[in-house]
Image (tube, grey):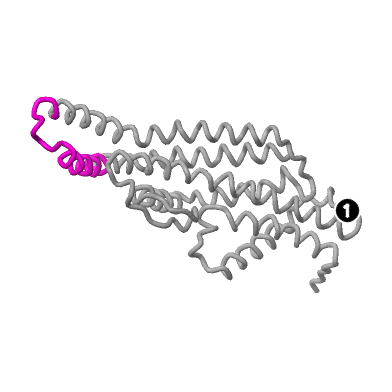
Amino acid sequence: MLEYTFSLVDFEILILILVRVSCFIYIAPFYGQSGSVGRVKIGLAVFVSCLLYGFVDRTAMEYTGLFGYAVIILKEGITGLLIGFGANICNSIILFAGHVISMDTGLMMATEFNPEMQTQSTLIGNLYSYLVLLLMIVTNMHHVILRALADSFLLVPVNGQAFDWNHLMTTMTQYITDLFVIGFRIFLPTFACIMVLNCILGILAKVSPQMNMFAVGMQMKIMVGFLIMLLTISLLPGIADFIFQEMRKIMVLLIEGMY
């Protein structure tokens, strides 16, 4: 006969696990989509918490009174948010590249609301963002992100956080550097072609002052921009690989700053 007991202490530990997991799901890419049903997110958080319950280290579970338990809940919430945030901010790389491409091609004023980042972004940035999200699903990168959360309980047990704020600040500085480097690699073909086009239009403006280069240049920039996007669309899996590697790197660095 199967006998299983579940005490109040076990329930308190389950709540702490649920706090970290739910905070992660709230902000992580793919899982934290604003279009996802809230009940699905809650159910996923509870299901993952129940799966992780039997493998969590409980040796650091020492607190005094309700205030001590509230402090642990706050620490677990910060841990889940930081891990999810480390994966989520990497989407800003593709939005930054799309922003620059739109600026070069003259589509800067054509913006729409991005529900994932909760802000206005350009059409090209949104297009690339959704394509990278599809590649994330196809390559099972969302499983890797969820596995990173599960592994965080081995490195950072419940109530075992030791926040190294200097290390976390260094991680954010490293991310900003990588953002510009990877973003420049993405929009470099469009940037180079538009720069050559601007030089040609400038020479033509000197040769034929009677031509309205402003009206001609706007149309040519859009045509050249769309042509370069069409020719470089096959490079998108490589771009996504750069972003996924950056996600792994930032999540690992953030976890290292908490133990």
Q: Residue furthest right?
A: 64
Query: Relative to 121, is 194 on the left or the right?
Result: left
Q: In which quarter of the image is the C terminus?
A: top right
Mark 1 Cα-neighbour bin, 10 Å: few <14, some 14–19, many ≥20: few
Query: How many numbered discs sit on the rendered protein?
Result: 1
- Three-letter code, disc 1: Tyr
Residue that numbered label 1 is attached to: 63
Residue 226 in picture, x, y percent from top left: 24, 44
Seen at 81% across and 57% down, the residue is 70
Q: In this view, does 219 lie to the left or right of 259?
A: left
Q: Residue at x 48, y 42 (%)?
A: 244
3 relative position to 131: left or right: right
Q: In which quarter of the image is residue 67?
A: bottom right
In front: 183, or 216? Answer: 216
Which residue is drawn at the image coordinates 17% and 28% (left, top)? Answer: 200
Relative to 200, is 73 above or below?
A: below
Outermost residue to the front: 210
In the image shown, does 73 or 207 lie closer to the viewer? 207
Secondary-structure class at tag 1 = loop
92 or 206: which is nearer to us?
A: 206
Specify whether residue 217 is painted magenta.
Answer: yes
Q: Position of residue 225 (x, y in %)?
A: 25, 41
Q: Position of residue 136 (x, y in %)?
A: 45, 50
Point out the image quarter for the N terminus. bottom right
Highlighted magenta segment, given as a residue range: 205-230
Residue 231 placement (x, y as % from top left): 24, 40
Relative vertical location of residue 114 with respect to residue 182 in this rendering, above or below: below
In the rendered structure, does residue 184 fall within the stretch colored magenta? no
Q: Write the residue at 81% across / 69% down.
A: 4
Q: Is the magenta stretch mostly helix, strand or loop?
A: helix
